[in-house]
Amino acid sequence: MAKDKRDKGVYYITTPIYYPSANLHVGHTYCTVMADAMARFKRMTGYDVMFLAGVDEHGQKIQKIAQEKGITPQQHVDEIVLSIKELWKTMEISYDDFIRTTEERHKKRVQAIFKKMYEKGDIYKGEYEGLYCTPCESFWTETQVADGKCPDCGGPLDLAKEPAYFFRLSKYQDRIIELLKNNRGFLKPDSRRNEMLRFVEQGLEDLCISRSSFDWGIPVPIDGSQVIYVWLDALSNYITALGYPDNTSKYEKYWPADVHLVGKEIVRFHSVIWPAMLMSIDEPLPLQVLGHGWLLLEGGKMSKSKGNVVDPVKLIERYGVDALKYFLLREYSFGQDGLYTNEVMLTRINSDLANDLGNLVSRTVSMIEMYNGGEIPPAGIEEGPDADLKKTAVAAAGKVEAHMDRFAFNCALDEIWAVIRRTNKYIDETAPWLLEKDEAKRGRLLAALHNLAESLRIISILICPFMHNTADKIRDQLGVGGEAAAWEDSKVFEKIGSAGPVRVKKGKVIFPRINISKELSRLEEISSGGAAAGEETGKEYPEQKPEIEYDDFAKLDLRVGEIEKAEKHRGADKLLIFQVKMGNETRQVISGVADNFKPEDCVGKKVVVVANLKPRMLRGQESKGMLLFADDGEGFAFVTADASHGEIVS
Ligand code: MSP
C-alpha cells in the first residue's frame, strides 16, 4: 500500500493521455505546457518529480479512423504517436515517462486491474443498451440526453446494444459524494466540484466497462470476446506507468499522484470513475484533480473533430518554443476558458517579450559593454531607486511560489514581469548615458550597471520553469551561462561577480519585434494553405524601390545624433517627437513610428539623422530633419551608429 507522501519531497504530475486520432493542436499543448512548467518549477524548488505523458490508443474512434484510412489501427497510431513525440521533443517537454496504451507493460497491468475488480465482486456481466458518443468514447442514458446529442461535445450519438461487463459504480456513490464534499482540495476549481457533486447526487448508475462490437482494445481477461472499455484502460495509465501492480518500486515512491491535470470535459472521468476504480482495488486516491478551461476560437472550442484547430508547429516555426509557452501560460487563467486569436498572441509576444524583456536584456548588456568595457562592475553604494529595485527583485520568488501553489501561471509570470518592468524603469531613472558624461558620477554609473545586471540575473532564474531556452540565452549574454540557475539564488541581490569578474557578451536579439499587421496576413495565408513549408520565418522585405543615381544620394547630409528625449505627439497618435543631440545643437525631429516603438525605449540610441531635410510643421510642432529607419524584413528598425571610428594602421 502506498503512503501519504506530501512532505517527502516527491511530486507526481500527469496530463491526459491524448487520443492519437489526429495531430495535436494548440489546445493540447496548453495542458502539456502547464504540466511541464509545473514539473520544471517543482524540480527547481527541490522536489523529486515524476511527470507522466502519453497516448490513449484504443477505442472505437481510433478503429473507425483507421478503417476510413484503409490501414490497421496500429499503423494509424504509430504514425500519429511519432508526430506527437516529435512535437513534445520540439517543445522540450520534460516528461519522465511517456506511456502508450498499446505497450505490453500497460496491457497486462490493465488486465490485472480488471481481474482485481472482478475478484472484489465489483464486475458483473449483463447487456448494454443505450447511447454512445464515439468522439468522447462516452456512454449516456436516455435521461442524461436532452436533445439526442452528446451532452459533452454536442455531436450525434449511436445506439449501442451488446452483451457487456459492468462495474458496480453505484456501490461507490456515497464514498464519492463524501470525497467531493469533505475533501475540498480534491477537485478544483470549486465550480467543477459543485457541478460534479450535483451530478453524483442525482445517482450513479453502474458503468459498462467492456465492448464487443469492435476489437481494438485490451481483451477482457476473463472473456476473449470482449475488449475493455477505453476509459477504464486509459485511466489506469496513471498507475500502470508506475509499474502497478507487479513492479511496485516507482508506485510506492510516487503514488498517489499530486495532481492530474485535465481539461474540464474529462473531469467527470477523473473525479468520479477513477476514484471509484481505485476504491475498488483498495488503492489510495490521487491528491488532486485540476480541471482547466478550454482554448476557444471564435465559433467555439478548438477541437480535432470540428477541424477548427491551430497548429502549434506552425507557431513554433515562426516565433519559437518559448514565445508560444510564454503566451499560453501568461494569457489564460487556469480553470477559465479563453479566446485564442493570432492578434492576441502576437501583441503579447511584442509587448512582453520583444519590448519588456528583450529590450531590458539588450540595453543592459550594451550599456555594460559601452560604459565599462563589458565587465559587470561590483556592487556600489545604495542610492535613490536602488532599494526599491532590490526589494522588488528579491521578493518575486516567494510570490511566484505562492501563485504556483494555485496553478496561477499567469499571476506568477505577472510577478516576474513586475520585476522586468521595475528594472526597465530603473534604467530611465538612473539614465546611465547621462551619468557617463560626468566623470564625477562614475561611481554611480558603475553601481547602476551592477544593479541592472543583478536584477537581470534574478529574472533569468525566475523565468527558467516557463522558458528555459530564453533563460539560458540571457545567462549567456550576462556571462553566467556556465553556472546552473538555482531557484534560491533568485532570493539574494548582489551575487553577480561575487566569485570573480564576470564579462557580458552581447548576443542576438532574443525576441525580434513582429510587424503585427504583416504577420497577421501571413498567418491567414498559412492557415489557408498558402505558405511553402520550410520558408524562412517572419522575414519578408518589401519590394525594392526604383534605382537612384549617386548624385541623388550625395545630396543627403547624414549625421549621427543621440536621442535624449522621446515622447508621443499630443496631437497625432502615430507620431513620436524626438530631441536629438548633434554636437552642440539639440534638434527636434518627428517620426511616424509611435506604433513601432515605445518612447522610453528610444532614449539613448545613437541614430542617423538626415540633417538637411527641409523643416516641416507636423500638427503644430516643427520637425527639423529626419531619423533613418530601415526595414529588416520584420518591420521598422532604427538605423543606429556604432560609436567606434576604426583605426587605420599603416
Ligand atoms: N484520451 C482522453 C483522455 C484520457 S486521460 C486518462 C482524451 N483525449 S483528448 O485527445 O481528447 O484530449 C483531451 C484533453 O486535451 C483535454 O482534457 C484538454 O486537456 C486538452 N484539450 C483538447 N482541446 C482543448 C482545447 N480546445 N483547449 C484546452 N485544452 C484542450 O480526452
Image (cartoon, rainbow, N blue to C red):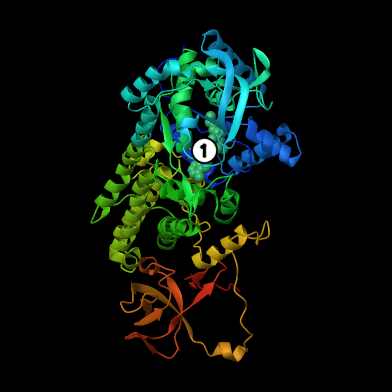
Question: Measured along the vertical axis of the image, is residue 177 above or below residue 354?
Answer: above
Answer whether residue 230 is visible to the viewer in this image.
yes
- Relative to the observer, which residue lies in front, 166 or 559? 166
Quadrant for the C terminus in the image? bottom right
What x and y, as percent, mark residue 645? 51, 73
Residue carrying label 1: 150
Residue positioned 36% across, 47% down in the render: 416
Residue 289 left/right relative to 631? left
Determine if residue 48 is in view. Answer: no
Foreground residue, 13 or 399?
Answer: 13
- Give the side of residue 90 with respect to residue 565, left or right: right
User: Which residue type carries mark 1?
Assistant: Cys
- Residue 230 lies, with reference to residue 492, above or below; the image says above
Q: Relative to residue 264, is residue 545 drawn left or right?
A: right
- At which x and y percent is residue 304? 58, 44
Q: Residues within 10 Å of mark 1 (few under 14, many from 20)?
A: many
Percent of width and height locating residue 573: 36, 75
SS at mark 1 in the image: loop
645 horizontally vs 563: left or right: right
Q: In front: 202, or 95? A: 202
**Residue 527 picture quarter:** bottom right
